[in-house]
Image (cartoon, coloured by chain):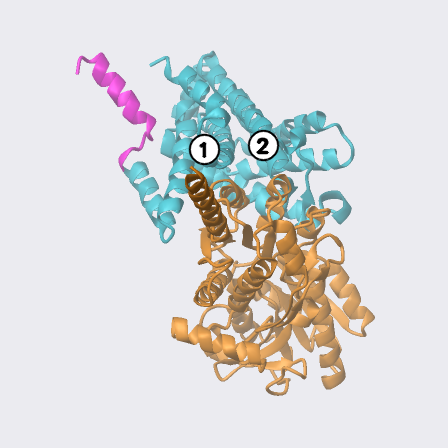
Chain colours: A orange, B cyan
Amino acid sequence: MNKLAVVLVVVALLAMAGTEGMAQREQVRIGISLPLTGPASASGKAAEAGYRLALDEINKAGGVLGSRLQIFIEDDGNLPAKGVPIFTKFVTVDRVHAITGIFGSAIGVSIVGPAKLHEPLIAMLGAASPLVERGFEGYKYLFHYHPWAYHNMEAVFNFMDFVRTGTGASTIAILYEDGPFGSAGVGDTRAELIKRGFDVPFMESFKSGSGDFTALLSRAKRHPVDVLFWIGFDADALPIAVQSREVGFKPRLIFGTPASWPIGFEGNPVARDVSGMAGWTSASPLAASKEFVKKYQAKYGSLSEEYMAPMGFVTLTTLAAAMNKAGTTDKDRVAAELAKTDAETPLGKLRFKPSRLTPSVYQGFDSDLWMVFQFRDGRRVPVWPKSMAAGPLAWRWR
Amino acid sequence: MRWVGPAALVVALLVPLAPAGGYQQYVVQVATFVLINAAVALAWDIQARTGQLSLASAAFFGLGAYAYTMAALRGVPLPVAFLLGPLVAGAVSLGLGVVTLRLQGLYFAIATLAFAEVVKVVFKELPLDLTGGAVGLTAPPLLGGHQTGLYYLGLGVLLLVVAASLAVRHTRLHYAFTAIRQGELTARVLGVRVVRTKLLAFVMSAALTGMVGAYATSRLFFVIPEDTFGIGLSVTALATAIFGGVYTTAGPVLGAIILRILEEGLRLVLREGYLAVYGVILMLVILYLPGGLVSLWNRRSRDAAGGG
């Protein structure tokens, strides 16, 4: 009888150990919401490539918490009416341990309500609008990787200071798309540029993707300027470059800040010396970036120039690392580990700090993320800041 | 077939209680957006029965959404702010209708499309502290943002639109609307006051769309001119009504249910290219069923009546 009791106890202990082991090996699931269709799909697809590359690397290295990491990628089309059900599905159906992706301000702000209801851990790829930042006030589980709109503007001002001191440029025309991306704080931008010694004789909004800038550029031509600064989307890059020439508008520098550039733009002769702001280029001299480029080419056989590719990669790898360090999927403990992130990434050093408008939000990259490049010989050549520059700024657009 | 309406209502009432396991909240979310799409499409259909092709749904939806948000943010009690949605949209449509409803066909469509764009630009350009400019505003949720409560409120909104549609269908208005659609001159000869009747349809449709806008905003918690006044909403309303069957009450509702569930279902099973399949299905129905899906039902009813 005693022997039977011992056997039963041993069996029970083994069963408990087995259950414990199974619990520890429960597959970690991450939900990724991206705009894979629609106007932001170039960025969404680049991010997807980065996430999948990270997934391969994480699982090759043993996965998360001893099991292969599982991801669910869904297309939100950058539409709130799709993004909200996807977010709910991740939490309630897929029962994910964290949500990432979430690219764009409309999706970012639309998930504020569902997020506050379910309180999942969110590693948000990027939304620039202050509406998103303010919406998440009091939320403890949001890690925002991308800079906010004011960070983007800070980078622009710093670059313009560099242009002003380096070339003596003193006049700027501003064209901005009339949506939240281009319009957020554009009045403050003008005021700040004037404060920094620039004259801004022309500033006007345009409808992104309209393709016809001739009237706007003809009006701008009446105000000869050194710099044309435009804030819009990839669809606007080519018409602005082509039609500026057509109407005889000749700023010495064309500088644009779209989230992504049209595919093949660098190969077009009109792109020569057009400058842009990017979170990353494949020519980045950082060691982590070179490593990323090598892995990316090995997996896809091509090269990406979209900074959302390394951004997706960095988001998933840091999230998985925090889970492994926490040794659990408990969101409080994972968040505590994620907050301690101190990593060399392809995009530069990543450390989280309290966000400026909403200190409860953890903010990753800031204005330091940005570099400025110029299209030259079919490539993006970093020209600013000095630490990243692979060549001098060409001051001769025509 | 009189049981279909009450049966659909019972199913709609049971959605949040359905034993859908882990899918339950997801189902409620999708169902909520079905209600929104159905209400906008049906509201569009009411004015379309006079033969006018309006592309201003997005404008009235946005006006309702902004009226609710701006009032709520200024301390107006939420139920009152909610009622401002249809009131503001209705009042603005009255002014627009007086100016544009003498236009015919394509000219009227273009005028309404232009109006939607103008309203969007105005809301972008108004002072930031008023409308939030291009960045928009966050909206306080109705019912504390309670998901199930908001679903039932959405169902109530749709039922109001259905009631308005049925009221039009079962009164003399139906004959007036139909007569105008089939020929304004003949309608005039028959004693129909054409402009006044078209105006009534237009204002009714706009007010209902404004109500849906206020509701949708209280569900999504934000307004942004680019999205809230997005032309996509007008196009979706039109496509949904055509897919389900125009000039009917059941058609736009059926269209919204099928299209939204089809889209969600396709997205879950066919990540790449689901929109292409969705588009082909939409195109086939429009090409081969000009009366929409409800025409299948009507055909069956006719066959049955004819002893077939």
Relative to residue A64, is residue A158 drawn left or right?
Answer: right
Residue A234 image offset from top left, x and y in percent: 53, 65
Residue B32 image offset from top left, x and y in percent: 51, 32
- Alpha carbons under labels 1 and 2: distance apart: 16 Å
Residue B293 image offset from top left, x and y in percent: 33, 29
Residue type marked 1: Gly
Visible residue check, residue B124: yes
Q: Is residue B244 magenta?
A: no
Residue type marked 2: Gln
Question: Is residue A160 positioned above or below A121 on the image?
Answer: below
- Tag 1 and tag 2 share a subunit: yes
Place residue A218 in its image quadrant: bottom right
Which residue is nearer to you in this view: A13 or A318? A13
Residue corresponding to mark 2: B147
Visible residue check, residue B248: no
Q: Chain of mark 1?
A: B
Q: Chain of mark 2?
A: B
Q: Residues within 10 Å of mark 2 (few under 14, many from 20)?
A: some
Which residue is nearer to you in this view: A63 or A277? A63
Q: Residues within 10 Å of mark 1 (few under 14, many from 20)?
A: few
Question: Is residue A221 positioned above or below B197 on the image?
Answer: below
Q: Quadrant of the image for the N terminus of chain A?
A: top left
Q: Quadrant of the image for the C terminus of chain A?
A: bottom right
Residue corresponding to mark 1: B21
Q: What numbered label is drawn on residue B269?
A: none
Q: Which element carries disc 2, helix, strand or loop? A: helix
Where does the magenta region start and end? B288-308
Residue B109 image offset from top left, x and y in percent: 48, 39
Residue contact between numbered discs 1 and 2, judged by CB atoms under 8 Å: no
First in residue order: circle 1 vs circle 2 = 1
